[in-house]
Amino acid sequence: MTIKRRRRTTVPFGYSSRCLSMAVLIRWTAYSLSSMVCFPSTNASARLNMPRGSFSRFSGGRPFSTSPIHQESGDPRSSKVTLKGMDFRELENWVQSQGFRSGQALMLWKCLYGNNSWAQSCDELTGLNKEFRKMLSANVSLTALSLKEVLTASDGTRKILFTLEEGSVIETVVIPCRQGRTTVCVSSQIGCAMNCQFCYTGRMGLKRHLSTAEIVEQAVFARRLFTSELGSITNVVFMGMGEPLHNIDNVIKAAAIMVHDQGLHFSPRKVTVSTSGLVPQLKRFLRESPCALAVSLNATTDEVRNWIMPINMKYKLSLLLNTLKEELSSKHKYKVLFEYVMLAGVNDSIEDSKRLIELVRGIPCKINLISFNPHCGTLFKPTAKDKMIEFRNVLAEAGIAVFLRLSRGDDKMAACGQLGKPGDVQAPLLRVPGRFQMAV
């Protein structure tokens, strides 16, 4: 028998360990970022048709993910059926397959999502046939999340921590407003593969996608916990942990459940799904979902966006914006929301504001200017408020609908870009372009 010996890696004479680490990081960056510039999923259907070059050598040739990605609804290890992973038609078919009439399915749906009941156990399924409830008790699970903790910020924002079946933790934020509008910000993944340089969640890399049930139940929990205290939860934004369109199957399905008129009954215009710019998935979302779209733009040149949002190396600004123009040309009274996180000395100049006007010309849109929320290890600083106002005024004078979005919940790490908890192994920080060295 021939024994193959491993090749030993030797350090060339004169290399320090620090130099070697830097060489490895540069090699990883060039190799991984040559394609999509993110940490892809281990699941073939979630790879976004990425070529081999998008896989990282940072972890020995494997993707950055630390656990498998489950696309199916509900916990894949559970022998019970997870009801919140089904849309209404699937629930109706399943109920009939168990020998009960479809009317029972509608009553069950209303127990889960409507009538201010938001049932979490079979004991709370009131008004159902006794035999039907007995069957449900034996065969279904009504929960996909376990409530771990609720943190309350000084401005009234709530951050909810949920524990998943395998022990991972995700975060959801509830944001009350004075105008009677309360928004729940839901997560779509554990971590994120996009590695946006200003985002704390991006430091985690991607662990796995959330199932449909795990996404939907965040909105259910928000209503169950806070409706009596804060009033109706009226809006949903998919702007928590993760890139929603990287998990597009479960996100589209979860959004459809949220807007169903016999259940949670959110208005499609008040359910907003955000993306960093996955162009093929963006096109699919606009064609399949009635819900609103937000695009996290954050730069007016490819140079800056390549650095702070590496997905731009795969889908350039011109491709992203031209795709939006084409897709929105056939949609009636539909406006995309552009999100623009303002980073001091990076993307907040008057020249940036003028370029932004030209970039969005011809696209029905609104723009949110978002104050950057610092976090541990960040290179960036928030733009001063007076400079944000100046930037806004330039856009407004050009006839663009533009709004300032100041921080909410930042004293509890509940603000935009602050969610999650990176571990010991983190996504790499990318090289700062020379002309921005002083800004960071």
Image: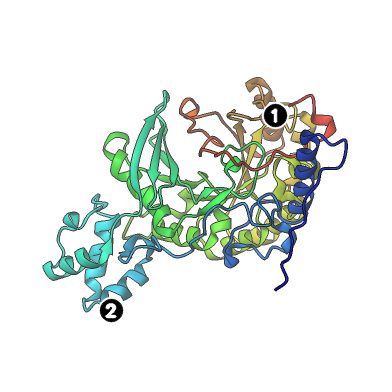
Circle 2/circle 1 CB separation < 8 Å? no
User: Which x, y percent locates residue 37?
Assistant: 71, 51
**Foreground residue, 215 or 377?**
377
Residue 121, by quadrant, is: bottom left
- Whether residue 322 is situated above or below residue 431 in the rendered picture: below
Q: CA distance from mark 2 to mark 1?
A: 59 Å
Circle 2: element type: helix
**Residue with the mark numbered 2:** 97
Residue 426 visible here: yes
User: Which x, y percent locates residue 377?
Assistant: 63, 29
Task: Give, as a three-letter code, the residue at label 1.
Answer: Phe
Q: Residue furthest left?
A: 130
Q: Is residue 58 left or right of residue 417?
A: right
Q: How many marks?
A: 2
User: Which x, y percent locates residue 114?
Assistant: 28, 55
- Whether residue 348 is situated above or below residue 79 in the rendered picture: above
Residue 93, by quadrant, is: bottom left
**Residue with the mark numbered 1:** 391
Identify the residue shown where x is 65% and y is 42%: 196
